[in-house]
Image (tube, grey):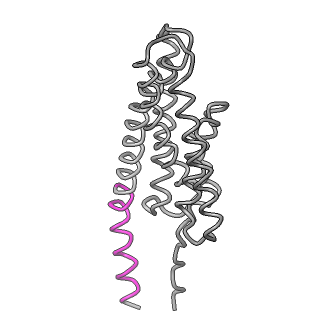
Amino acid sequence: MRHTIRRLVGRLVALPARQASTTGARRRYLLSGAVVGLVLGAAARAWMRTISDEHVFTVGGSLFIVAFFAGMGALAGLAARWRWGVGGPRSSLVVRAAAFAPFAFLGPFMLLFVPSLLAALVSGHPAWRTWARRLALAGAGVFFGLTELIILTADVPGNAGVRLASGLLYLPLAYALFFTNRLALDPLPRRERPAPAG
């Protein structure tokens, strides 16, 4: 009985420190995700400029795009925290929805990043049959190659340097969405249930 009381008191004493640590971890993940999203937002704004017929940057549009990507990055950071167990258990649906949001919210642009989705599916499920993995990888490779080819040869205002910049800026965006799709699609780790007190 004395041992049980001592253990309970120890948990109560440690609770504030644990809560502070959890809050600090949440802030770090959110901030890190937002910073990465901010950088990707700037890259996305430049990329949209290279594939557009309009060569004008509007302040409002640019701020919206950068803020949008920063928000999506923060959401992905939160999903990563939940997935890797720093923030305690969350339902599978919540974790997957938060991680999939950056891809889903792209709207029509998500079609350009289907290779990221296919690659995330394959890399997150090594137990798939060999033919299924090869088929998905081949589809991702062909889709990615065609997307880059279209970007590099698109008939948009500008010289070859603009098209090359467009093809290069597509790469970090595709990788970022590969990462968030993996967060959403990989099997979630099983959490061990606490042993019943006896």
Q: Nearer the viewer, residue 46 or 64?
A: 46
Quarter of the image for residue 4 reads bottom left
Provide the residue span drawn in magenta. 3-20
* Residue 117 falls left or right of residue 60: right
Q: Is residue 1 left or right of residue 101?
A: left
Image quarter for residue 16? bottom left
Decide: is 54 above or below 44.
Answer: above
**Of residues 95 and 138, which is closer to you in this image?**
138
| Percent x, y of residue 61 | 52, 15
Q: Is residue 70 magenta?
A: no
At which x and y percent is residue 160? 43, 18
Residue 95 or residue 125, whichever sits in front: 125
- Residue 154 in picture, x, y percent from top left: 56, 21
Residue at horizontal 43 percent and vertical 30 percent from the top: 169
Residue 114: x and y in percent read: 61, 43
Residue drawn at x 38%, y 64% is 15
Q: Quadrant of the N terminus?
A: bottom left
Viewer-closest of 55 and 164: 164
Total labels drawn: 0
Q: Residue at x 35, y 47 (%)?
A: 28
Q: Main secondary structure of the magenta part?
A: helix
